[in-house]
Image (tube, rainbow, N blue to C red):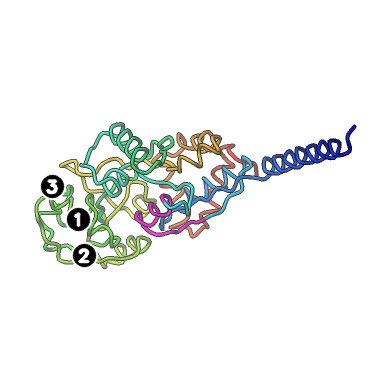
Amino acid sequence: MNPKRKLFRLSLVFLVMALLLQACASAAAPTVVKVGSKDFTEQFILGEMYALLLENNGFQVERKLDLGGTPVAQAALENGDIDLYPEYTGTGLLTVLKQPVNSDPKAVFDTVASMYKEQYNLVWLDPAPMNNTQAIAMKATRAQELGITTISDMAAKAGELVMIGPPEFQEREDGLPGIKKVYGDFQLKEYKAVDPGLRYQALNNGEADVTVAFGTDGEIAAFDLVLLQDDKKLFPPYQVAPVVRADTLEKNPKISEVLNSLAPLLTDSVMQTLNYEVSGNGREPADVAKEFLTQQGLIKQ
């Protein structure tokens, strides 16, 4: 055989072998998935659950929890700083997409799923049955004293009331602007903007009469609070689901199966209990998440 031809064939063999070795190494290397969350208890727990489930199924996870509010998390997802995070259908509808309020859970999910894919190339996975809807809460004794059972009652007596809640509630379409649009342009005695984690402590200490609440907050039962009836149907549903970059799913389709396995287990009562383990009993979100997933058989001890 011609020496040059022999050398060429050997070089070709070595090149093919090198490419195969590189391909095998790439296949063996675990995919890194960047999991984010917003900046409150429930998000920390959910973010940890997503991370633990993915790790248990062979993914390498980079945690980017406690990013901030919705605009920060959404921007991080769009920019590729994270691959996924837990989001609420009502927040997607109103805060991100700026769509009209809708109280039909299926219609809201279908809208956000379609418009996120079209506008941002983001995919909503299966929503959980839990509904962390916006709500207004009072201590049962104070509500009874003032004769307040509905948001209409609260609006009528707003001038006597101090409300406490997160800063963004003053701007959100489903926050104070939305309440005033539906229930009348009332004026509170004061609105105290605080970190979300301080709302219930302040209410319990008598620093406010009314607090911004959410349907899965553990403190509702623990502190003997009542949720005021949304008698004019203002608040949309807030089911939670992982929102994932489409390119991440294309490369790692197993993510859908892994995270969708969690969705049916997250009911209102389950999430209230998990949240209070952190906010009330002082446990770490990662420990609470791991314990729950282990009990449900979704991850190994």
* Earlier residue among tags 3 and 2: 3
Question: Tag 2: Cα neighbours inside 10 Å, few (<14), some, or many (≥20)?
Answer: many
* Residue type at numbered disc 1: Leu
Task: Determine whether the residue tagged by mark 2 lies in a helix, strand or loop.
Answer: strand
What residue is drawn where x is 28% and y is 32%? 107
* The one of 58 and 114 positioned closer to us in this rendering: 114
Q: Is residue 276 visible?
A: no
Q: Which residue is mark 1?
A: 176
The residues colored magenta run 64-78
Question: Tag 3: Cα neighbours inside 10 Å, few (<14), some, or many (≥20)?
Answer: few
Left/right placement of residue 266 relative to residue 229 reads right
Quarter-of-image position of residue 187: bottom left
Task: Determine whether the residue tagged by mark 3 lies in a helix, strand or loop.
Answer: helix
Left/right placement of residue 58 relative to residue 186 reads right
Q: Give the numbered dot on residue 91.
A: none
Q: Which residue is mark 2?
A: 191
Question: Tag 1: Cα neighbours inside 10 Å, few (<14), some, or many (≥20)?
Answer: some
Give the vertical position of 127 relative to 166 (above or below).
Answer: above
Q: Which residue is mark 3?
A: 182
Mark 2 and mark 1 in contact? Answer it, CB < 8 Å: yes
